[in-house]
Amino acid sequence: MSESDKTSRSPGELQDELRRLMLKHIESLKRETFGGLSQEEVREHEEGLKRIRELSADFIAALKRQRR
């Protein structure tokens, strides 16, 4: 995602994507706990965590911009 895309997204849009990714992550944790994950699923799990971190930072930045 380009820098301009990050700054043009509203806190609500970022929050919706974070919610979606976190729910997906919870399901991944359940599968990992009760059935194990394939190597591909582990990679997807790690990529999802990375994206959650990025979106969290973008969300905080968007909230700060909105407060100005």
Image (tube, rainbow, N blue to C red):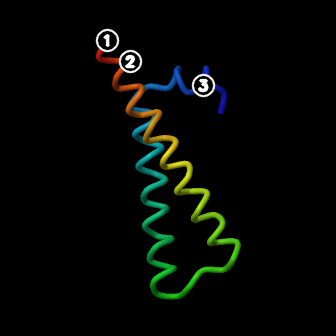
Q: Identify the residue at image location x=69%, y=76%.
A: 39
Q: Identify the residue at image location x=49%, y=53%.
A: 21
Alpha carbons under labels 2 and 1: distance apart? 5 Å
Instruction: Count neighbours of disc 1 (C-alpha within 10 A) and say few if under 14, some if 14 to 19, many if 20 or more.
Output: few
Three-letter amino acid code of the residue under disc 2:
Arg
Residue 2 vertical placement versus 38 (above, below): above
Instruction: Count neighbours of disc 2 (C-alpha within 10 A) and say few if under 14, some if 14 to 19, many if 20 or more.
Output: few
Picture quadrant where residue 59 is located: top left
Residue that mark 1 sits on: 68
Three-letter amino acid code of the residue under disc 1:
Arg
Q: How many marks?
A: 3
Residue that mark 3 sits on: 5
Instruction: Count neighbours of disc 3 (C-alpha within 10 A) and say few if under 14, some if 14 to 19, many if 20 or more.
Output: few
Q: Identify the residue at image location x=52%, y=21%.
A: 7
Residue 37, given in percent of the width and then of the height, sits at: 60, 80
Residue 46 vertical placement versus 30 (above, below): above
Quarter that holds the C terminus:
top left
Q: Which mark is residue 21?
A: none
